[in-house]
Every structure is written in C-alpha cells, then in structure tokens.
Amino acid sequence: MALTRPLNARRSGPSGAAASHIAGTRGVGASALTTSHFLLLYAAMLVAAAGNTALQSVMPAIGRSIGIDDFWVAIAYTWSAVLWVALAPYWAEKSDHHGRKALTIMGVSGFIVSMVLCGIALYAGLHRWIGGALTFGLFAILRAIYGGLGCATPSATQAYLASRTRRSGRVAALSALSSSFGLGTIIGPAVAPLFVLPLVGLAGPLFAFSLIGLAVVISIILWLPNDRKGRRSGHGAAMSYPSLATPPTGASVLAATAPRRTRRLKWNDQRIRPWIIAGVVAGHAQAAILTCLGFFVIDRLRLPPWGSEGPISIVMMAGAAATLGAQWGLIPRLNLRPRALILWGALIGAAGLVGTMLSHDLYGITLGFALASVGFGFTRPGFTAGASLAVPLSEQGAVAGVITAANGISYVLAPTVGILLYGLNHDLPFAVFALMLLGLAWFGRARLAG
C-alpha cells in the first residue's frame, strides 16, 4: 500500500495546493471560499503558532533573569499545553454548534488576552515589582486562558474551511491550512529577538504578538463572512499543541475529512499499538529536549540571561526548519515506508542529541539540534503513516484521534522529566533520550511491520 494517504498533508505548502484549490472553488456559489477568506483563516492559525514558539525562545532567559528555578519555568509554561490537549477535542465537537467564525474569534481572542496578561506579569517580575514565585504563579494561571480557549482556533478554522470547499479539494485545502503551524514554528523564534526592545525588554514578544493577533481578529470580524446561516457539511478536528515538538503530521486533516460517526478506536488495538508506542516514545524525547534546550544554550555558552534569546532563537529556528525540510522535502523524495521512517528517524535523532550534548559553541549546538530535528521530522510522520495504513478507510477518523492524543501526551510528563534530569546534570537528558531513541530503533526493527 502506498504511503500517500497520511503524507499528503505535509506535501502541500501554504501556497501551491491552497491556491489551486481556492481557484477551483470560486464557481461553487456565494458560499465558496475565496483567497482572502482562506488567508484570514491561515493568519489565525499562524499567529497562534508563531506567538507560542516565540515565547518558547524567551522563557529560559526570563526565568533566569527573574531568578526562578528552571523546573518551575518549565512547569508554568507547559501547563497550557496540558490544557490544550485536554480541551481541544471538546472545542472540535462544539465548532459545529456555536458557529465556526465565532469560535475562531474566541480562540484568537483567548490568545491575545493571555499574551497581554502574561506579558504584564512577566514585565512586573522582570522589574522586581513582584517576586519570582508570584510572577510564574500568575503566568501559569494566565497561560491557562490560551490553553483552554486558544485550542478552539484550529478546529474552528478547519470546520469553516471544510464547510465552504468542495469535497474533492477539501484535503488539499485543509493540508495547506494546517501548514500554518509548521511555518509558525520558524517565524516565531526568528522574529522574537526583534521584539526585545528597551522599553518592554524580554516581555516584548508577548506584547508584539498580542498586537498582531488583535489585527488578525479585527480582520476576521470585519471580513470573514458569518457562517451561522446556510452552513454546509464539514467539520474540524483537534490539532496538537503548536510547538517545535509537534510539527504537522496530517492527523487532523484525516480526522476532519473522515466520516463523523466512526467507532471508538483504542490505542492498544493490536493493529496500531506498536505505531502508537513508537510515536509516544519519540514525542517524549523531543518534548523533553525542547524543554531543556534554552537553558542548555545559556549554560553551555555561558550567556547572561539578557541577550541569550538571540542564540536560543537561532537554535530553535534551525530545528524547526530542519523538521519541516525533512517532512516537506526529504520524505516525498526518499519515498520511505513508515517502518524505515521510524528506524532512520530514531537513529538520526539519537546522533543529533549526542552531537548537541558534545558541542561547546553555537555552531555545534545548532547543527546537532538540527540533525536531531531531522530525525524527529522522520519519526512523527512515520508513526502517523504506519497507524493510518494499519486500519481501513472507514476508521481513519478514529485513528487520527488516537494519533492526535498520542502527540499531545508528550506534554504531560516529558517536560517535567527532562528538566529534572537537566537539574541533575546538563548532559543527562540528551544522553538518556538518545538511548531511548536507540531503544526505539531496536523496538521498531523487531515489532513494526512494513
């Protein structure tokens, strides 16, 4: 069986597939999606992903500047990810009932409010107006707004797009829309240092992205047609938390295009269990390393907190670009089967983590993490494809839900484990998770078919 079904979602870039599809929908009628409407939906997804990864690149520097323990920085930041994982399926179900435009506005507004309030809390902490413990306590609470409401944006935008496109072109359009998350993981770290300005300091990126989000939500209110009346069929699906650790895999596209009524599929179903285990192991390794990465750059390069956001952003941007390069460039050309993607991805990822651990300059760390990210860029679509191909077409929606849950599970324990290991020894998380990836390669060789 060919590997095209789950990988089509990654081969469509934000312009090619979307443009050709949108051009084909203009003759459908008044409800057809136009290019400007697609760009509004794309912007809603892009700003959330870019803002989130921009925050990832400055949080280690903020934590060190305030003087809070690395562990609490990681916990405060990942709390919103846990909420996202828990509530994203709920909003995906509600998008059909409350209006897709309304939920899109709610999701982006949640992002804006959370970023503004978190920026104020961090600004106060950086200027010693409040203590470090209170600063990150408030930050964790206020980030919950993004985790709880922001997760409505992907499913609502997908549902809006799906309801206004032809069934024949829906996969291409949804794939193009989901690519916004991948693009955001590059844009966020790239521009974050530009917003660290003298007046607002390290909290600048939060305020900057909240203003960008405000422009997006105003544009949606003014120019995106209301979908409360005359809606056609089409639904959205929960999408993984926007992060370098959860690049797009097409699972949400599979869920959004599959029939709504499918039987519930358990992760331990014998057909998909080995693939889900492989995905969870690789996801834990990537999420844990990403949690430690900013602190590792500061400590290994002996950087002061102020100014460290630049090197951290370079490393993160290289990792995001390497992941998307693997998914959009290498995989379609190499035509590897799912099992090979897992095996090679685990080996390449382990080599990259060891290279990062042994590096003592920015060039080496960047190169090592980029190599590891290529490996992760293989493993995630590998397990997605393997699980998808293991079940018939009638169960694609069900398996996509399991895949999305497996992607999100990494945020429950991995950040905590990673930062605890880092507290014991700065090299320890890289060594431990490199060994885990080698174990995954052995497991894949023995247990994965195809």
Image (cartoon, rainbow, N blue to C red):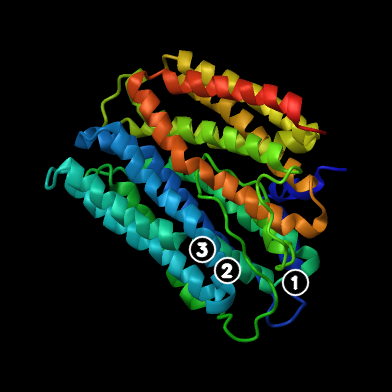
N-term mark: 3 or 1? 1
Label 2 element class:
helix
- Judging by the rendered image, the residue that carries numbered circle 3 is 153
On screen, residue 300 versus residue 411, left or right, reads left
Rendered image: mark on residue 57: none
On screen, residue 404 versus residue 243, left or right, reads right
Label 3 element class:
helix
**Residue flagged by tag 1: what amino acid is it?**
Thr
* Residue 242, position as x, y percentages in the image: 51, 49
**Residue flagged by tag 3: what amino acid is it?**
Thr
* Residue 85, position as x, y percentages in the image: 50, 53
Q: Residues within 10 Å of mark 1 (few under 14, many from 20)?
A: some
Query: Quarter-wise, where is residue 117 in the image?
Result: bottom left
Residue that appears at 13% across and 47% down: 130
- Judging by the rendered image, the residue that carries numbered circle 1 is 25
Residue that appears at 52% across and 59% down: 88
Label 1, label 2: how far apart the Cα atoms are: 26 Å
N-term mark: 1 or 2? 1
* Residue 52, position as x, y percentages in the image: 43, 48
Label 1 element class:
helix
